[in-house]
Amino acid sequence: MEAKEILKAHIAKLTILTDEQFDYFFSHFKKKSFQKGQAIITEGDPVDCEYFVISGCLKSFYINDDLKMFILQFAMPTWWASDYNALYNHTKATINVDCITDAEVLCLTDADREKLCKELHNAEHFFRWRTNKGYVAAQKRLLSFMNNNVKYRYEELLKLYPELYNIVPKNLIAAYLGVSRETLSRLYNA
Amino acid sequence: MEAKEILKAHIAKLTILTDEQFDYFFSHFKKKSFQKGQAIITEGDPVDCEYFVISGCLKSFYINDDLKMFILQFAMPTWWASDYNALYNHTKATINVDCITDAEVLCLTDADREKLCKELHNAEHFFRWRTNKGYVAAQKRLLSFMNNNVKYRYEELLKLYPELYNIVPKNLIAAYLGVSRETLSRLYNA
DNA sequence: GGAGCTTTGTGACCTACATCACATTTAAAG
DNA sequence: CTTTAAATGTGATGTAGGTCACAAAGCTCC
C-alpha cells in the first residue's frame, strides 16, 4: 500500500475528509526514508515536525545524566511520533527520536498542522481525537506503572503489541518498561 | 470571580471566542456543588460529563484489587477532570473522581462537548490544545516516574503545585507519587 | 570465516521502598 | 468537650529490582 493510502485509511478512522480535502491535507506531508539507527530528533535541537510512520519502527527516548535510556514510545506503522513538548512550545528537544529499523515516515511541520487545523475543521477534529487517544493511553500506562510489577507490564505490552516481540531487542523493551535489562532477562529465564 | 468569568479567562488563554460565542458555549455548562468526600464519578457507573473546577479540589483515582489507591490527578480551580477513557469510549467508569474539599464545578456532557466542537471551530481548537497539554504533562510525569526517586518526585510536585501542600493530606500525596505513606513520611522526618 | 560490534544470560551483592504493627497526633462530629 | 475517625510517625523486617562483573551468543562487515 502507498504511503498516501495508509494515511488516508488512518484518518478515515476518526473523521471524514472528501477526496479533494484529503489530497490537500496530504500535500503538506513530506515523505522521508531513514536507516536503522539514524537519528530523527536529537536532544537540544529545534523540533519542527511530527512524523507519521509508514514502515519500520521508531523509538522516542530520553537519556538521563547517568546515560540511562528511558523509552517513552515505540512507533510502528500508522503511529505518530515527535517531541510534542518541544513541538508545541517551540522549544529545543528534550527527547530523542531514532530508528530501530529502516523506516519510511511522512513529515508534517508544526506550522502546516496548525494551518490545516485552521483551514479544515475536520483536520482539527482528527488531531483532537488522535491526542485524546494518546492522553488516555499515557494515563493507562502511568497507572500500570504504579500498580503492576515488571512481569505483568511486560506481558501486557506484548499482548497489546505482539509485533514488537520480533522487531525490538529486549534491552529496549526493558528501557520502555523502566527496568534493567538484567531483571527483564531473569523474568523469563532462570 | 464568577464561574463564568473563570471559564472565560481560561478559554481565552488558548483560543478566541466572541462574547456571543462564549455565551453560547457557556450555556452548555451546568454548575454543581459538592461536599468534601462526595463522589462525582464512581467505578462501574456510566460517565457522561467532564468537570471544570471553579473552587475546591478533586482527585481522580483508581483502587486496585488489594484496595490500594492510586491517584491519577488532582484537580484544582481551572483544571478539568473526568474518566476520559470512559467518557470518550462510552464505557463504564474504571476510575473514580471525588472531592478532597468542598467544590464547585461546571459540568459539560460528552454530547455537548462534541456538539460545541462541531458548531464552533474554535471550541474544537480549544479542546485540542487542552488535551495536548494534558498529554505532554502525562508523558513528563511518566518520565519522572521512571527516572527519579520518590524524594525528587515529591519536591517536583510541590514546586509545580505549591497549593497542594496545604490542601491535600500526605497520604494522598503518597498515592499520587505511587509510594507508601510510610515511605513518604520517612522522607522529611527521621 | 574471523574481527568486532550489539545483545543476552547469570551470579553475587546492594538498596530503595513495601509491609506490618502499633503509637500518637490532628481533625470532625455528635 | 468528648468521642470517633482520619492522618501521621516510627521501628522491625521482607523483597523486587538495581548494579557490577564477566561470559556467551548473535549479527554485520570486510
Image: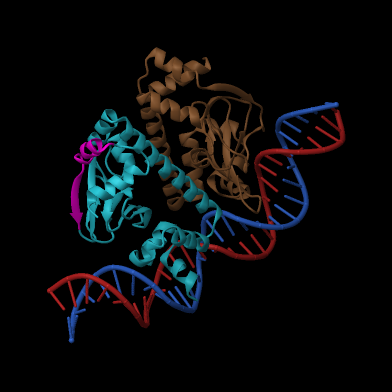
Chain colours: A brown, B cyan, C red, D blue
* Quarter of the image with the N terminus of chain B in it: bottom left
Residue B174: x, y in percent? 41, 62
- Seen at 36% across and 29% down, the residue is A125
Left or right: residue B158 compared with residue B99: right
- Seen at 28% across and 45% down, the residue is B8
Q: Is residue B26 magenta?
A: yes
Q: Quadrant of residue A126?
A: top left
Q: Nearer the viewer, residue A103 or A167?
A: A103
- Seen at 38% across and 29% down, the residue is A124
Q: Nearer the viewer, residue A13 or C7?
A: A13
Residue A108: x, y in percent? 52, 27
Residue B148: x, y in percent? 54, 56
In the image, residue A5 sits, relative to residue D9, either above or below, namely above
Left or right: residue A34 compared with residue B147: right
In the image, residue B183 sits, relative to residue A188, either above or below, namely below
The magenta region covers B18-34
In this view, which residue lies farthest toward the front? B19
Q: Is residue B42 visible?
A: no
- Seen at 36% across and 24% down, the residue is A122
Left or right: residue B50 compared with residue B183: left
Left or right: residue C29 compared with residue A79: left
In this view, which residue lies farthest toward the top? A19
Residue B50: x, y in percent? 27, 44
Q: Is residue B77 magenta?
A: no
Q: Is residue B35 visible?
A: yes
